[in-house]
Image (cartoon, rainbow, N blue to C red):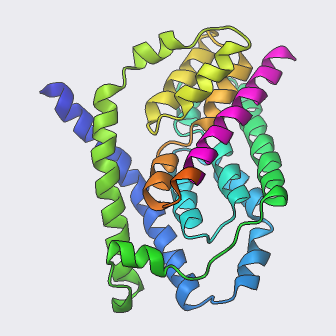
């Protein structure tokens, strides 16, 4: 019973951290629908999406990955911007590094590597894939029955509450299932296999993955490349929100697979060099 109560408390704290980001994303979507009904303006703004995304993703926790998932589902931001935020996001990495009094050089090395890789891949994705931006969120509103006509604030609160309820339940289940010790023994120090396993663990929509991967690196159990590969896929609850909000399941799966492949390759290359 104590474990269950602790899990619920932990999940509730995770949800509280997401509230401002989810609410902000719906406010932005509502403003775009009511105020910015010009796709040319959205396209112009999104030219700098991967740059802004790579910077915002470096901020601790997974708030901006959650925000980007929501905005991409409504096609307000491009796929490249989504990837840049996912790849630069590290969830609990920075707090763990600071708590362990890690050398500033190591911290900057990790942050800079993730920033460059997120920026690079985000730009490449936007060059290869032209996202059809949308300035109308009618589909999302119809699915959520959010009373958009009653005002921006009310509809944003309804949207946010519904998503948080979904995430809260899923997060409780994940926290009960995930064993951090089991995760740590799953990753080995093989320079080729380790990045692949690490990137798969990073996909877990929960802070446990980034904590385990960061701690294993600090304890010198896994090499730098393996740490990076796991942190590149470690976008926290971002992927969970993407699967909840983006109705194109095939696209969601493709995004997930692409994250694993790119992160694994980057990790293998970094381990070798």
Residue 40 visible to an observer of this rendering = yes
Residue situated in front as seen by the camera: 217 or 242: 242
Q: Quadrant of the C terminus?
A: top right
Q: Is residue 114 above or below residue 78?
A: above
Asked if the stretch drawn in magenta spans residue 261, the answer is yes
Q: Is residue 199 above or below residue 162?
A: above
**Residue 244, quarter of picture:** bottom left
Q: Is residue 8 left or right of residue 236?
A: left
Q: Is residue 266 left or right of residue 34?
A: right
Q: Position of residue 57 (x, y in %)?
A: 64, 50
Image: magenta residue range: 251-273
Q: Position of residue 63 (x, y in %)?
A: 51, 53
Prevailing secondary structure of the magenta residues: helix
The image shows a total of numbered marks equal to: 0
Q: Position of residue 259 (x, y in %)?
A: 66, 39
Q: Is residue 213 above or below residue 150?
A: above
Q: Is residue 172 left or right of residue 107?
A: left
Residue situated in front as seen by the camera: 77 or 61: 77
Q: Is residue 67 above or below residue 240?
A: below
Residue 105 visible to an observer of this rendering = no
**Residue lying at 65% horizontally and 55% vertically, measured from the top left:** 82
**Residue lying at 56% horizontally and 51% vertically, measured from the top left:** 250
Q: Position of residue 107 (x, y in %)?
A: 69, 31
Residue situated in front as seen by the camera: 36 or 144: 144
């Amino acid at each position: 019973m104590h474990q269950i109560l602790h899990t619920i408390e932990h999940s509730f704290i995770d949800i509280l951290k997401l509230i401002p980001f989810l609410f902000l994303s719906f406010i932005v979507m509502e403003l775009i629908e009511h105020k910015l009904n010009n796709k040319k303006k959205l396209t112009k703004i999104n030219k700098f999406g991967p740059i802004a995304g790579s910077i915002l993703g470096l901020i601790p926790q997974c708030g901006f990955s959650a925000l980007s998932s929501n905005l991409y589902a409504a096609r307000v931001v491009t796929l490249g911007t989504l990837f840049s935020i996912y790849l630069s996001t590290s969830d609990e990495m920075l707090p763990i590094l600071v708590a362990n009094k890690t050398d500033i050089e190591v911290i900057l090395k990790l942050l800079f590597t993730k920033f460059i890789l997120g920026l690079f891949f985000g730009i490449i994705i936007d060059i290869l894939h032209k996202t059809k931006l949308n300035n109308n969120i009618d589909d999302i509103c119809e699915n959520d029955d959010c009373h958009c006509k009653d005002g921006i604030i009310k509809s944003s609160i309804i949207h946010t509450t519904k998503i948080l309820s979904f995430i809260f339940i899923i997060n409780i289940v994940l926290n009960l299932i995930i064993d951090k010790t089991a995760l740590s023994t799953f990753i080995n120090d093989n320079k080729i296999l380790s990045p692949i396993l690490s990137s798969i663990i990073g996909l877990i929509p929960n802070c446990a993955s980034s904590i385990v991967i960061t701690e294993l690196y600090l304890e010198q159990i896994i090499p730098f490349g393996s740490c990076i590969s796991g942190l590149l896929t470690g976008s926290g609850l971002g992927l969970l929100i993407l699967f909840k909000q983006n109705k194109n399941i095939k696209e969601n799966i493709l995004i997930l697979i692409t994250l694993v492949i790119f992160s694994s390759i980057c990790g293998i290359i970094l381990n070798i060099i």
